[in-house]
Structures are given as C-alpha cells and as structure tokens.
Image (cartoon, rainbow, N blue to C red):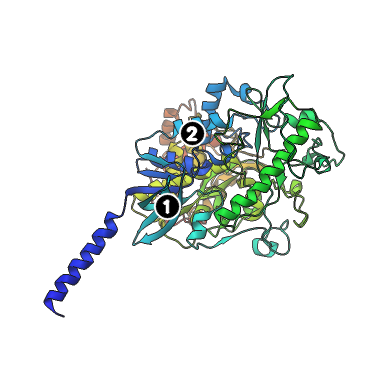
Amino acid sequence: MNIKFTKFFVFGLLLSCYSAFAQVNHQTDVLIIGGGASGTTAAIQSARMGVKVLVVEETEWLGGMLTSAGVSAIDGNHNMPSGLWGEFRQHLYDYYGGPKEVETGWVSNTLFEPSFGNITLKKMAQNENLSIWYKSSLSNISKNGKLWLAEINNKGKKQTVEAKVVIDATELGDVMAKLKIPYRVGMDSRYDTGESFAPEKANNIIQDLTYVVILKDFGPNANKTIKKPEGYDPKEFDCCCDVQDPASHDNTPKIDCSQMITYGKLPNGKYMINWPKCGNDIYLNIIEMNDAERKEALKKAKLHSLRFIYHLQTKLGFKNLGIADDEFPTADRLPMIAYHRESRRLNGQVTLALNDVTSPYTQKTALYRTGVAVGDYTIDHHHLKNPDAPQIDFVKIKVPSYNIPLGALVPKTGEGLIVAEKSISVTNIVAGASRLQPVVLGIGQAAGALAATAVLSNTDPANINIRAVQNALLESKAYLMPFIDVKPNDPSFKVIQKIGATGILKGTGLSYKWANQTWFYPELPVSEWDLVNGLKAFYPPFEEIHPSGNLSTADYLTKVVKAISKKEVKTDQILAYLKQQNFNGLTAESTLTRRMVSHVLDQFLNPFNMEIDFTGKTKQATNNLTN
C-alpha cells in the first residue's frame, strides 16, 4: 500500500472515530428509559450507590402509574415496607399526618393525591449523581462495543447519550422490543408453563387497561357535570354499583353506590375513579402499535372514562364531584398516561411461574434464593371487558406472599440491558400479582442495584454476583424474602433475610384474603431434623450428623457448625457470640430460637456469602466459610 495513502487512511479513520466521539453529548453510567414507578426507584438506588444516572421521561412527572396515570391507591405490601416503597410511604405519612390519614378509601391502606406523589418522588430523586430529562423520548439505540449509544429527543433537541448499562423502565417494554430482545405478549399455554390455571392455547389477550380520572368534591351545591360524551349509553354502566367482593364466592349483587364511589377516596376530598365492574376499564391492546397509533387508540379509553364520569354525575347524582382542577398539568385535567396492567414480558434468565410462587421450596429450581423484590397481593386479572378472554377463576388461585428472582430482570440475550416495570420475565398469570405498585417499585430498586453493581464491578448484569446485588438491597432496607413478622427496624432483619434467602430456615406461607403472608416465626425453636435437612439442601454432604425430633440446643448447633466448617468450634464460643447479640442466660443445653440459630449460622458459616446462579443453585459448595 502506498505510504501517502496509508497516512491519509489512518488520519481518516482517526477523524471518523473522533467525529463519532464528538457527537456524544452526554456520558453516563446508567441510562434509564422511563421515569415511571420502576424507573424512578431504579434511578434513586443507582445514584445512591455512587454511579452516574440519566433518566429519560416522556412526561414532566416521575412515578408513572402511581402519579402520571393516577393510580394513587397502593395495592398490597402494607405489612412489608420494603426499601424505597417504605421510604415513599413514610413521606406520605409525614405530609398527611400519619397512617390513618391516608387510609381514606376501602380499597387500600395507603391513598394519596397523584400530584403530591410526584412531588415526593422528585424530592427523593434529588442526588448529584442523578439527571432527569423530562418531556424526552428515545429515538434510537445501538451498541458501540460494550457501550450503548442512545439517540434522545430532549424537548425537541437531538442528544446522543453514551452509557454502560441501560434499563428498560418503559410502560410497555418498548426498549427491548426496539432491540429485538425476545419477549412474550398475552396468555401462556398451560403446556408451556406447567400452570394448570392457564388456558390450553396461548393467545395475545392482555388485561383491560384504564384511563383513570381524579374527581374532586366542589361542595354540596356545586354542579360540575361535564358535557354529555359522545356515545354515552347508561346501560353500559348498569352494574357499576355492585360492590360484591369476588373473593366472597357470592354471586349475589350488593348494590351500594356510596360505597362504590369511596373505593378510591383520596385525602382532601378527592376520588380516584379506577372501577372495574361496569366502570372505566376498557379492552385495548396497543402494545405493538407505534406512538401515533397508540395516541389515537387511547382516545377511546379517555372517552370511555368520561362517559362513566357523566354517568356518575347524572344517573347516580354525584354532580358535585368534578374533574379535579389541581392535579394534572394537562388541558383536559386527565392523567398524562393510561394505566397499563400488562406489558410485553421478557424472556429472561429465569421465568417466575405460578408453581414457583405457590410452592417456592419444592421446585427443581430455588428461585426464592435470588429474590430482590417482594409482593403479597393476590393474583388479580382484569378481563371483564373482553368476551374473548378465556374464563379463568383467578379467585381460586391461592398463593402466599412471594419474591421476584433477579434473573427475571436479565435477558437471556442482550448484554448491558436490564428490564424493569411490568416487563420482567414472569408468566401471564404471575403478572397479575407482580404488576402491583409496591412490587414494581421494588423491581425498580432491584434494577438500580443490579445496574450500579454491574458498573462498579465492571461486570455484565448476566454475570453478576447475585449476593452482591442482594447485599446492596439489604443495606437499603429492602426485603429479599417476604417475611411479614421481621421488619426492617428489627435488629435481626438483615441476618434473618440472609438466612431465609439460603433456604436453610424456611418461611411458612399462606393465602390470606387480599394480602397473602409468609411468616418466619423468629421466636419459635428449631428441631434438629429441620436444621440438618435445611443445611444438607444447601451444602454438599458433610460428616454425618444424626438428627432427632428434639429441639436444637447450643451444644447440638455447635456440632453441626463444626461438621460443616471443618473447624474447631466450641459451644462456649457460640454462647459468647449470642451474648454479644443480647441473647443472655443461655447454656449448652438451652433450646435456641430460629432468630438465635440465624445469627449463629450467619456468623460461623456465612452461607449467604456462597455465590449462587440465577436458578438459586450454589456455585461454590465448600468455600467462603468464616470463623
């Protein structure tokens, strides 16, 4: 090759590289597309862990379904104030005056004004590591080596962002679709998921969506009746005052219009209108539509909600309730976005199925060991507006509280990408529970912890140390296991969460009304049989210890610890340690509680430090033991 030509070639190549680099307007560690419920908590968590974060949000609010969609009545997790969800709720308590002041509607223990939810989340998001671009959207995204290059429309101005990790926190999983990451939409076949409640054949039917409306009481003499909406037919809303709980298995209608309207009563005389039975639910599947098609389709949802409002004001006599004029910064005073109950669902490293939820300890995999977010709400699907939806009696699906495995946020293919919001890798049936607000907030916090851990360790999310991510969440007072009887302010919280996440000591789960439960029972004793079998399921074969049905004592626990660790451990050492933890008056023959056993296992064996894969299987069966 000619020397002169070679020089020009090299110079041109360097110039090209420089030009490509010069086009980058913004560099960040973590790029989050979507400032909804999960995008916001992901951003807060990542930024607090010390990495640089940029959020791209299409509206001018944070919070998504909690705020911009108006669904400001929290479903579930009242007894599990996990991480950022608990922090958010405490802000509500502080502002409104305590728990009773936000228990205004009968659907929830926590209701609030969407506008204040937005203010609260923006306050929580104040961090020098965190930037937020409002009224912005993703135009294009691609990979440049190990880095992402994203083209952002930032208030009409084109910006190119370079990032190490991207989180898809969009309402409908739009980023993974743009990247052609495999996903599913609609109902699964029972033959694919092993769920007996699923239909025989898969289909693309999703849950009904809702365009929520926030009403405000303008006083008994006010008349805030809106103009009669096009297509209004009172027959469409005939059964809207039926407040019979489907969980009661009583099909007899219970007509009470006053009770219906207070379903979503908010503080300060406002009402969230998000009513499924002959209310403002509507069936629209807009997932695969483009932006323009979605906007046009959602006009139908808005119109349907306005018809219902007109019905409430005229036929039911609530003319004093008008569309709130101090909530949403929109021309029509309706929410900025619709409430989507269902999205695309990722094909992840693992998929959480109903059997993993109902019987977490008896599956071939141990997904519960990888838990990063918790939920206790029942399996709840809205299909009343689609006659083609297969009839599934979701009331009969009994589940305990559960956790979300980390692998459900990580694609099988696609380096540097994390998926959050309602688009994680769960089956269609499980999505009926994982879609609820506190769970999605927890999913976002987990996504943020995963992203920050990946950046700080220079590791792809698919190759991450799961325990490192879980440790970061525990430091943020987030739950890994859904134990309702050990709260974050309990001095044993972290220890019990870690031991619970090994499965050595298991929780007891049960289905309980609309808030399912899992109990750890920290003050109960542990039998020798349960202790040894729990350890054998986690560790490789160790020196034979013959358990009986007797309750475990300090002396017996010492023998077990010695057999596993292969180290000289004496009962006096264990008793001395327990005394340091304020467990006083114990002897070698003292029966130990599950709380005490958890502390000893954590201190002398540290099983939580043993790495696991996305299925919950241990990677190193004999390492990482401590004195």
User: Does label 2 or label 1 sit earlier along the sequence?
Assistant: 2
**Residue 307 figure quarter:** top right
- For the N terminus, the quadrant is bottom left
In the drawing, what numbered circle is on residue 83? Answer: none
The relative height of residue 311 versus residue 461 in the rendered view (above or below) is: above
Could you classify mark 1 by the number of other residues whose Cα lies within 10 Å: few (under 14), some (14-19), or many (20 or more)?
A: many
What kind of residue is marked 2? Answer: Leu
Front residue of 93/70: it is: 70
In the drawing, what numbered circle is on residue 166? Answer: 1
What kind of residue is marked 1? Answer: Val
Q: Which residue is mark 2?
A: 121
Task: Kindly state the secondary structure of the residue where label 1 is placed.
Answer: strand
Give the image location of residue 204, x and y in percent.
67, 60
Q: Let me know if residue 526 appears in the view.
A: no
The relative height of residue 204 versus residue 456 in the rendered view (above or below) is: below
Q: Hey, which residue is sitting farthest bottom in the picture? A: 1
Front residue of 71/7: it is: 7
Task: Kindly state the secondary structure of the residue where label 2 is placed.
Answer: helix
CA gap, disc 2 to disc 1? 21 Å
Q: Residue at x 50, y 41 (%)?
A: 59
The relative height of residue 357 versus residue 192 in the rendered view (above or below) is: above
In the image, 179: left or right of 301? Answer: left
The relative height of residue 461 versus residue 258 in the rendered view (above or below) is: below
